[in-house]
Amino acid sequence: MMPRIMPLNRRTVLELLSGATLLVGMTRTRPLWAIATTAPTSGTASSSSPASTSGTAPKFKPDAHSALIVVDVQNCFITGGSLAVPHGEDVVPVINRIAPAFANVILTQDWHPPGHVSFASSHPGTKAFEMIHLRYGQQVLWPDHCVQGTPDAALDADLKLPQAELILRKGFHRDVDSYSAFREANRTTTTGLKGYLLERGIHTLFVTGLATDFCVAWTALDARAAGFDTLVVEDACRGIDLKGSVAAAWSAMTAAGVKRIQSSDIEAA
Ligand code: VGL
Ligand code: ZN
């Protein structure tokens, strides 16, 4: 299988940088786009290849080695929640429609203790959506959200994913945020997800959920860095979009070899 990583030449990096200041600013040691420079080249799943070549749009057929990853589809991120993503609830019917095609479904849950470091309320004199510098790098400050055990942190009740086999909680360390389902914002603490997937023989990930420009993007980029064949289902995601962050996220993901697909590209069960 050919490497799927696009080489990051100087021009690519500059192009990405111009639109990616927000994402780049959130990581200390390595800008987000730089993850692409170390991403392995081994995405091998046949399931991510077009299943049909004649006539119609290419289809992707999930197989036993594929998983649907549903990122943070929680009350906090949908209308009425503490950090509502515009039209966040619209991902739910799309996810419910494609889920039956998957033998493996994994959900993530943003799961912060009270007083979490990512909350503006934990930093007197700051306001939500400002950036501050923390020990591990730049951090966007958020309204209090997804506090452990609260109804706000619960998964959206309209999700129909009875077959889901893992709910992975992240962001539970008080002093470190975790957008990514793989690695926390200090970029060294891992969540165990990579090991889980490898032990289960899963190597292709179809990523959906909220928010495109934060937890979905960081999860997809870390999935690539960990060697997974990674597809983001665009219409099954919605973004927060701070200062062009959705476009920046897509640039970074595309450069890292993440495939941008639509739910209609996935063959129904
Ligand atoms: C998220 C901001 C803060 C997300 C989580 O799920 O994208 N965004 N915490
Ligand atoms: Zn959060």
Image: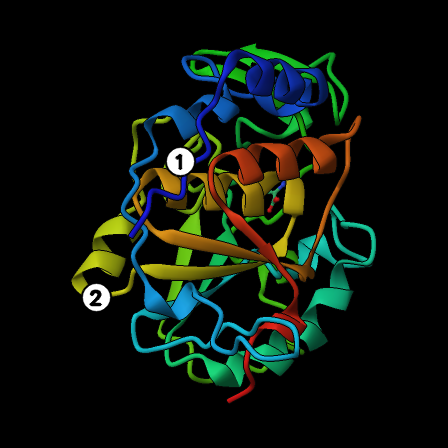
Residue at horizontal 32 percent and vertical 63 percent from the top: 45
The first of marks 1 and 2 along the sequence is 1
Q: Please tell me whether residue 69 is drawn above or below residue 118 in the rendered image.
A: below
x, y percentage for residue 108?
Answer: 47, 57
Neighbour tally class for label 1: few under 14, some 14-19, many 20 plus, Cα within 10 Å: some
Q: Quadrant of ligand 1?
A: top right
Label 1 sits on residue: 173
x, y percentage for residue 176?
Answer: 44, 28
Q: Which mark is residue 201?
A: 2
Residue at horizontal 30 percent and vertical 40 percent from the top: 41
Q: Please tell me whether residue 118 is drawn above or below residue 224 in the rendered image.
A: above
Residues at circles 1 and 2 in contact by the CB criterion of under 8 Å: no
Q: Residue 65 or 196: which is nearer the viewer?
A: 65
Secondary element at tag 1: loop
Mark 1–mark 2 Cα distance, whole angstroms, equals: 28 Å
Q: Residue 43 or 76: which is nearer the viewer?
A: 43
Q: Quadrant of residue 127?
A: top right
Mark in the foreground, 1 or 2: 2
- Viewed as shown, does residue 121 lie left or right of 163? right
Q: Amino acid at mark 1?
A: His
Secondary element at tag 2: loop
- Viewed as shown, does residue 241 lie left or right of 109? right
Residue at horizontal 61 percent and vertical 25 percent from the top: 23
Q: Amino acid at mark 2?
A: Gly
- Say whether residue 88 is visible: yes
- Taking the view exactly as shown, the residue that stands out farthest to the left is 199
x, y percentage for residue 29?
Answer: 41, 13
Q: Which mark is residue 120?
A: none
State how many labels appear: 2
Residue at horizontal 34 percent and vertical 42 percent from the top: 3
Neighbour tally class for label 2: few under 14, some 14-19, many 20 plus, Cα within 10 Å: few
